[in-house]
Amino acid sequence: MTVEQGLRELDAGKLSSEQWTQACLERIALRNPVVKAWVYVNGEKALERARQVDREGRRQRLDGVPLGLKDIIDTADMPTELGDPEIYPGRQPASDAAVTRLMHDLGFVLLGKNTVSRHSIMLPGPARNPHDPSRTPGASSAGSAAAVADFQTPISLGTQTGGSIVRPSTFCGAVGFKPTIDTLPYAGLRRYSRPLDTLGAIARSVGDLSILFGEALGDPRFDSALPVRRDFTVGVWRPLGWDDAEPCVREAFDDAIARLQQAGVRVKVLDMPKIFTQIADDHDIIMAYDLARSFKEIRRDHHDKCDPALLEYLDKGERDTAEDYARTLDLADACRRAFMDVARDVDVLATPATLGEAPDVTDTGSNIFIRIWTLLHNPSLTLPISRGPRGLPVGLQLVGFQKEDARFLYWARCVESILGTRVHDV
C-alpha cells in the first residue's frame, strides 16, 4: 500500500498499525537477503511502537505509518554507520538527528536503517536493484529506493548531493523527491557539501510525498486532496547528453510529452541559455572540493580502507582551487536567474532522469541530467513512467521552482494522474 491507501485503511478500522508494520517486516525478512536494502532492522521496537499506536489510538495523521531512514541519519536507538561499516563499525550516536526527532513526533513507526552505497557517495554498495539483482539500484540512497520499490516500506528518507535520490528512485521504480535545499533540517546527518546536501524522501506516489512534507512543515499548501487539473503548462528541455541516452529513455520521454499534450496539457519547448551547457559538469567542482575537505580525516586515518575511486575523486578536489569553487557558485547564481527568465511561463519542467535503464551492479550510472538541479536548488522529482527492453524502470524527471515545493508537488501529481506510474507492478 501507499501511505495514502494505508491511512484510509487505518481510518476505516480495516488495518492496524501492527498489521502494517508486521507485513513490512515479513517482506523485509523475505527479500532483504537478495535486495540488501536494510543494514539494520528495528523489528521489535517497531512492533512495540505500532502496538502502542493501536492501543492508545491514532492522535495525528501519520501515527502508525512505517518508515525507513537512510543510514547517514543519526538515530539514538539504532546504529548509524554512515555507509562506512569498516570505518565506523557499530557507530552509535548519542542523540537523534533533527529529522529523526521530527519523524518520531509525527508518529511514524521507524522500521530501521536503509543501506547506503560505499562511502555513501557514487560508488557501488551492497544494495541491489529489486527488479534484477544483477543491476544497480544507484547511489547513495540506494537502499531507501530499493526498499520502497520492493514494497518493504511505503516511504523512506534519503539525501541527495549529486543525484542520490532521483537516480536510485528512477532505477528502482519509485517516486523520489529532492526538495529545495534546507526544506527539511539537515542537522545530525553526515555532511558532504553545504551548498549541495539536501534531505528528501522516496515513496510510491506523489500524494504520499505531499502528505509527509505537509505534516513535517505544518504547511497546508501540501494538500494531496486537491483536484488535479489539465490546464497547465509543461516546459520541455532535452539537455546536453540527450543524444547519449538510450533509445528507451528518449522514446519514453517523447511518449510522455505526447500523452500530456493529448490530455490537454500545454507544452512549451524551452531553449536554455548557453550557460546551462557547462553547469552540470561544474557541479563536480563543488562536490569534489567539499568532499576533499569533509573526508580529510578519514583519508588520513583510514587510507587503507578508502576505495581507490574515492581517493582519485578526493585528489581532484584537492586540485580544484578556492577560485574555481567561487566561480562555480557565481555561475550557479547566474543559472538560477536565467532559469527564472526562461521558465517563467511554465508550471513545471520535464526532462529525462537517467541515460538509460539501471546498469550492471559495478556501475551506479550517470547523474548528468540530475545534478544540475541539486546545484541550482530547484525541487525535482522522478516518476517511473515506463520500462525498458530489459524490463527495468525508466523515469521522467520533473523540476520546479525554488521555495515553491508545495506547488511543484501539486503539478507533479497532475502529471502523475495522466501518465500513471509502474511502481505498483510486482
Image: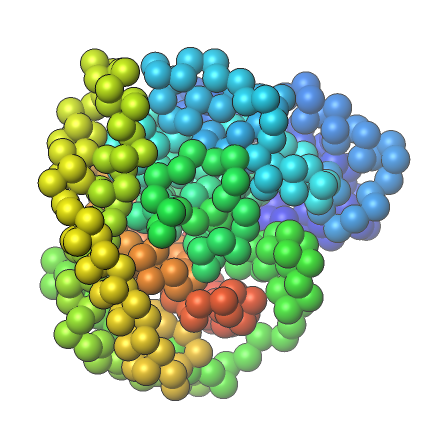
Q: Residue at x 61, y 27 (%)?
A: 95
Looking at the image, the residue that sits furthest to the front is: 323
- 20 is higher (above) or lower (below) than 395: above
On the image, the x and y values in percent for residue 17 come to 74, 36
Q: Residue at x 55, y 79 (%)?
A: 229
Q: Quadrant of residue 298?
A: top left
Total marks placed: 0
- Is residue 280 visible in the rendered image? The answer is no
On the image, the x and y values in percent for residue 89 come to 42, 13
Q: Residue at x 79, y 28 (%)?
A: 51
Q: Nearer the viewer, residue 78 or 336?
A: 336
Looking at the image, the residue that sits furthest to the right is: 56
On the image, the x and y values in percent for residue 207 come to 58, 59
Q: Quadrant of residue 83?
A: top left
Relative horizontal placement of residue 217, taking residue 378 as reference (left or right): right
Q: Nearer the viewer, residue 316 or 122?
A: 316
- 339 is higher (above) or lower (below) than 244: below
Q: Residue at x 42, y 27 (%)?
A: 82
- 246 is higher (above) or lower (below) than 141: below
On the image, the x and y values in percent for residue 124 come to 26, 30
Q: Quadrant of the N terminus?
A: top right
